[in-house]
Image (cartoon, grey):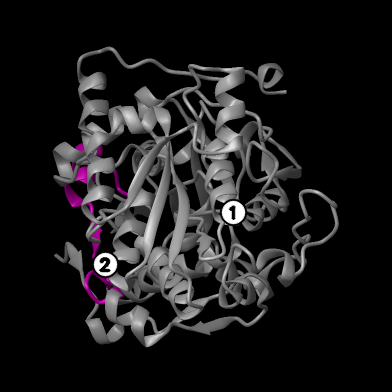
Amino acid sequence: MRTKIILKESEMPKKWYNIAKDLPKAPQPYLHPQTKQPLGPDDLAPVFPMSLIGQEVSTDTWIDIPEEVLDIYSLYRPTPMYRARRLEQALNTPAKIYYKYEGVSPAGSHKPNTAIPQAFYNKQEGIKRLTTETGAGQWGSALALATQMFGLELSVYMVKVSYDQKPYRRIMMETWGADVTASPSNKTNAGRSILEANPTSNGSLGIAISEAFEDAASREDTHYSLGSVLNHVLLHQSIIGLECKKQMELVDDYPDYVIACCGGGSNFGGVAFPYVADKASGKNVTLIAAEPKACPTLTKGEYRQDFGDTAGMAPIAMMYTLGHDFEPAGIHAGGLRYHGDSPLVSMLYDEGIIEAEAYHQKEVFENAILFSRTEGIIPAPESAHAIASAVNKAKECTATGEKKTILFNLSGHGHFDLVAYQEYLSGKMQDFEYEPAAVK
């Protein structure tokens, strides 16, 4: 009975999958935040390298992964897939549960899949320094690793509530040479304006994006790097789903459900997008994005154009949004505390091609504890949203007797989130939820 499904290093995908041609319609263009006109390459050039701008708008189905990127990927890829047999037994379910484990990367999550190529392309263009935002710190630590690999400086604006909750993520980034600032800060106009209005602001990813974007735009040697939402980010993450397909073939199986947590959309798109083409060609596969009830972007947001950041400096995108000035409660799944969602994920949800579910954090941690006690891995709070959804689907199979196959993406470990686990285990954790009227 096979538990661990491993690909050889030589079987690692050599191309990224671009979903553009498998979309139901062409995406709406990003708009300039000031002119409200469609953005062109010249508008993005001050903050992104031309190679990434080209990937953002490409309609090629396959894009070659540079050798320099593959070389660093090989430190941790291909990542393992596991059959969660002990979890199945605990649930007494006829379902088969598989999980793809991205926590084996040096940074402990899926985020290096895009951090590494972003650092590479910026280095190629002669950029010396990058800025970025981070919520829980997984993206910031991944980019700190990547910039160290390519000899670039990095300045990270970390959402204040996470900066305080997760000091070891900050220390991890600093160990890899990054400068880390709690956001909102006094370093930027955007940060100062937020603090003036609300001196005790917990911050948000939207605010941190504003600060990082402003910082990058103020220096010619600096570009901005985003860890989710944008098309080229989800392109780089497609290596997850491509490996999953090969691994499922090795055990002669195919998922009925593909599940991942969803904040900006990078790990969900990474595992689910390679299955969208299958679904379009008639495969019966359900793709589920699991999000927090405290930041219910897909399940309670509006599908409309909105700024990608709080200060209105970033491009305007057509997406599901709670409003760019929305500040979610300080839940522990910091990486899912974003007001908007990837335009590509948003379109697929609006078209009914993917589904979305929302969970309270206490239910999420209950399932994270079950998973850690059966499978041995302590999951990141973000990833545990996918576990909650997968467990619910397995319980449905227990009730109906259906022998369905469930695949979820375990996007990272929770070794730096033990304060959150302590809060849950001590009974102090609280749930937060916004009613539709409050969201509006």
Q: Residue at x 65, y 30 (%)?
A: 325
The residue that mark 2 highlights is 79
Q: In x, y percent, where is residue 320?
A: 68, 42
Q: Nearer the viewer, residue 229 or 284?
A: 229
- Is 18 on the left or on the right of 374, as rendered? right
Taking the magenta stretch, the answer to whether it contains residue 394 is: no
360 over 84 or under it: above or below? above
- Tell me the distance, in whole angstroms, between the alpha carbons under discs 1 and 2: 38 Å
- Is 20 on the left or on the right of 261, as rendered? right
Q: How many marks?
A: 2
Q: Secondary structure at mark 1?
A: loop
Question: Start and end of the magenta stretch?
Answer: 73-95
Q: Residue at x 20, y 20 (%)?
A: 425
| Badge 2 amino acid | Thr
Q: In x, y percent, where is residue 312?
A: 70, 41
The residue that mark 1 highlights is 218
